[in-house]
Amino acid sequence: MIRYIQHKDIDKPRWDAALEACVNALPYAYSWYLDSVSGQSWDALVLDDYAALFPLPVKRKFFIPMVYQPFFTQQLGLFARDEATLQLLPDFLKAIPRKFLRVYLHLNAENAVASPTRRLTHQVALNTDYSYIYSNYSSVVVRNLKRIVNQGMAAESSADVYTFLRFMQEQLGGKLSDLAPGDIKRLEHLLLEVLERKKGFIRYALDKEGNRIAGTCIVRSNNRCIYLLAASTTAGKKKNGMTFLIDSMFQELAGKDIVFDFEGSMIPGIARFNKNFGGQEVYFSCFSRRLL
């Protein structure tokens, strides 16, 4: 039986334990991740005793109650212990309470549903040796890596969320200014949670003078490395700092049962960058409903 549960009644330890057992688990669906990105404003649908999970981030906009896709969550949808239970997706979609007059969600790549709207991500399987991963790089990446060899570039790990956020804001400028102050605060909370729970890391590329020229935050969980946030300085773009960072991570993680998810993109230039590293296209569906 599919049950609707309000946020205050969700057993979060049970939820997280159930997610760990799901065949399509993603870090976006952990209770702590959802708490961070939604400001602890999410309800859920569950099957029986948490045998399947369907998070419902909720908010009001112009007094209209709605289910929405929070920033920094690429995919949500139905998570289940086995493939057979994933076939119940249509039942879960029908079970979303009608009090939510508008619904817009990104389902996950394992949720099979006919949808007029799909989104794209790029993924690289790292469970092979580095030489094989390298062989799938485009000639552009190979050429840039050869140029990097004599530049004295190095990678640096950091646990300083606030410095990282300042770096992102300085480099991304308007892209982050589009976010409301509350969303920036939620991002800050998310990054603090990621590092505190050892579910990810911050990494910089340094030039030979020790200047930070590129930086990224990776969420690592459930056999995934998710390229959550990244930016380069003007010098970093010229010196291919991000190419250096991604390649160094691939060298470090090669041979492990990990999928590196670039988190997109629908933007042609970014999609081309991802594919240059051997990123394979993976599509996931969007679900929308309007009762008003």
Image (cartoon, rainbow, N blue to C red):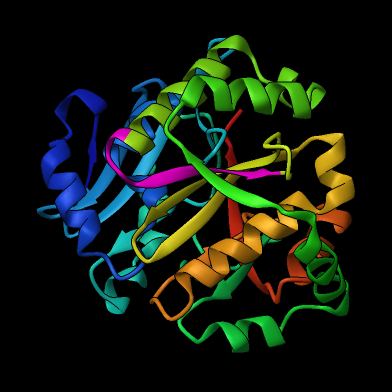
Q: Which residue is drawn at 26% across and 75% down?
A: 82
Task: Please indicate, yes or no, whether residue 3 appears anywhere in the rendered image.
Answer: yes
Residue 279, image x and y in percent? 68, 72
State the extent of the magenta-drawn residues as a range: 196-206
Q: In which quarter of the image is residue 119?
A: bottom right
Nearer to us in this view, 6 or 241: 241
Specify the quadrant that holds the N terminus.
bottom left
Residue 20, image x and y in percent? 22, 59
Specify the quadrant that holds the C terminus.
top right
Q: Which residue is drawn at 33% across and 59% down?
A: 79
Tell whether position 205 is magenta: yes
Residue 245, image x and y in percent? 64, 55
Q: Residue at x 70, y 87 (%)?
A: 135
Quick check: 231 left or right of 237? Answer: left
Nearer to us in this view, 67 or 246: 246
Residue 3, image x and y in percent? 21, 45
Task: Please indicate, yes or no, whether residue 118 appears anywhere in the rendered image.
Answer: no
Quick check: 277 left or right of 204? Answer: right
Total residue callouts: 0
Q: In this view, does 229 lie above or below 160?
A: below
Q: Residue at x 73, y 44 (%)?
A: 207
Q: Quadrant of residue 43?
A: top left
Q: In which quarter of the image is residue 102?
A: top right
Magenta part mainly helix, strand or loop? strand
Nearer to us in this view, 279 or 19: 279
